[in-house]
Amino acid sequence: MSNTYRHRRKRKKRFRIPRGYIYIAAGIIALAVLIVGIYAIKKYTPTKEHMDLADYFQVFHENEAAVVLDGEYISSELEEHGYAIVNDGNVYLELGFVKDYLDDGYVYDSSEITLRYATDSEVYTATVGSADYSIDKSNNSLGFPVVLAQDDTVYIAEDYLKLLTDFKINYYSEPDRVVVQTVGSSTDVYTAKRKTQIRKLNGPKSPVLEDVTKGESIYVVRDTGKWSFVVSENGVMGYIKNSAISFKSTETVEAELPERTYNHISAGQDISLLWHQVTNQSANGDIATVLASSTGVDVMSPTWFYLNDNKGGIASIASSSYVSTCHANNVQVWGLVSNLEDADVDTTTVLNTTSSRDALVNNLIAQAITYGLDGINIDIEQLSGDAADGYIQFIKELSIKCEKNDIILSVDNYVPTASSEIYNRAEQAKYADYVIIMGYDEHYGGSEEAGSVASINWVDQGVADTLNDVPAEQVILGMPFYCRVWEVAEDGSVDSTAYGMDAIQSYLKTNGVSAAWSDEYGQYYAEYADGSTTYKIWVEDETSIEEKLKVMDKYNLAGGAFWKKGFDSTGVWNIIAKYL
């Protein structure tokens, strides 16, 4: 038997993990999963922590209520006063807040603690601490103080405000807060699809401000992505998840008070008004001559009245015979009142003090009635910014009384500039019958550089800017019958003298100076030297006035006005007659 060789495969020895190690590893993995799960739960599970509303709607002043305006929380932390207070259960809004956001028509007189407001036909008056208020001469009562003063801050009762101003307001307590919406503001209304929460910030970990029930209305102020900033039915504002709400409708705050009607008295078409500077009673006797030499004039405005004390008193040199002569020639008389004649008069005090303003209005109306005036022309210049409220209130109150007495009210205005915004032409236009642009004094006696009194582009721009606030049918363009001869010294300093139309022609002739037409200025320009002094003259004459009359026509204005009689020439009236 042969030998047989058997080859055996050698088996590999298997490695076995001890069962104990497996249990340990599984435990570690389970622990890791548990930790991750706990972390995820903590990270993504919404917090149930509730924030006290008093910590959100913070107040910093006595009796203060927090204010939400058109969906924005207005904090008073940095202010010396609150924007709203609650007194004996009644809500009051701070005067400045009211003027800035709701209605600028409220005018407060701190010296006589009186609040005034003029509608289109009536004047409302209330005093601090009193429940009574008046509408013209009729007395009424609110039942609790209309106006309160707290720490030198004035507050107006919500119920009184609602008589005069359109807005929506809701009051909520604990903590005290008011939600104010202005007319025209729109809000998208959503409905809660399920029970949810309004949170301080747009995240699940932000504290809850209010729990919201299914079906509750939510007012969305703005969508921020997955969340929206909202205001609830209870006046709580914060963030809510967009997935929890659905769109319902859009609500717009509508005006509820009757629409106001501002009536105006018309003086006809193509008004030609001539300012007549009268400085004493005897000068009134020249009116027949003035009319005869002023072809086509249909309104005379004599400078008869001026403020002569701080209590609303006026000086007057009005004349019945002057008026009679004008009326016999089918010419109206609009008596002018100025504030520049008496340096001791503080115009700001007169206009801002209720009793003084009343006296001024009544004195002007009395003069107009006594002398049978057709109108009053207001020429209050160099007004301080502090008098802005009192001035426009004066125009409103005078206008209401003028309309009741069939008296035309016109108001003289500078061309619009940043500094003249306080004259508030847009508000003037509601009440006054005519707004007159003083289209001159581009450069004036106190100017630091020589220049035209009324260059054509400057006049055109002044008209265009005025028409942004005033309808063309109420605008009268004032034009100058004068120019200035400028003396420019070697050091660049300037001085000037005013010349009327005939006088400037005599001046040019006497000095052998020829003027050349300038399209840029819309007038003739002359310049000459005498020693080290240079003389510059932008001439006003028939041709330059015609250029301004063309601007008047271009914008379809109510007419033209001219300063002043005595500076005119015979020829200029022929030009004016072509347009007016």
Image (tube, rainbow, N blue to C red):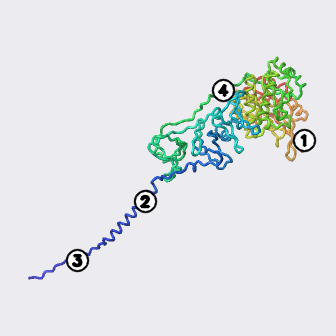
Q: Is residue 26 above or below residue 241?
A: below
Q: Are marks 2 and 4 in contact (CB under 8 Å)?
A: no
How many residues crowd mark 3 within 10 Å: few (<14), some (14–19), many (20+)?
A: few
Please state if 32 lies on the left or on the right of 426 as rendered: left
Q: How far is the residue under mark 1 from the one under mark 2?
A: 98 Å
**Residue tagged 2:** 38
Q: Which residue is disc 4 drawn over? A: 261
The earlier-in-sequence mark between 3 and 2 is 3
- Kind of residue at badge 4: Thr
Q: Where is the N terminus found, in terms of image quarters?
A: bottom left
Question: Callout 2 environment at 10 Å: few (<14), some (14 to 19), or many (20+)?
Answer: few
**Residue at 25% across, 75% down:** 12
Residue occupied by mark 1: 530
Local SS, label 2: helix
Task: Measure the alpha-carbon separation of dots 3 and 2.
Answer: 52 Å
As shown in the figure, which amino acid type bears the numbered disc 2? Ile
Residue where numbered disc 3 is placed? 10
Q: Quadrant of the C terminus?
A: top right
171 left or right, relative to 293 = left
**Crowd rating for badge 1 (residues with CA inside 10 Å; few <14, some 14–19, many 20+):** few
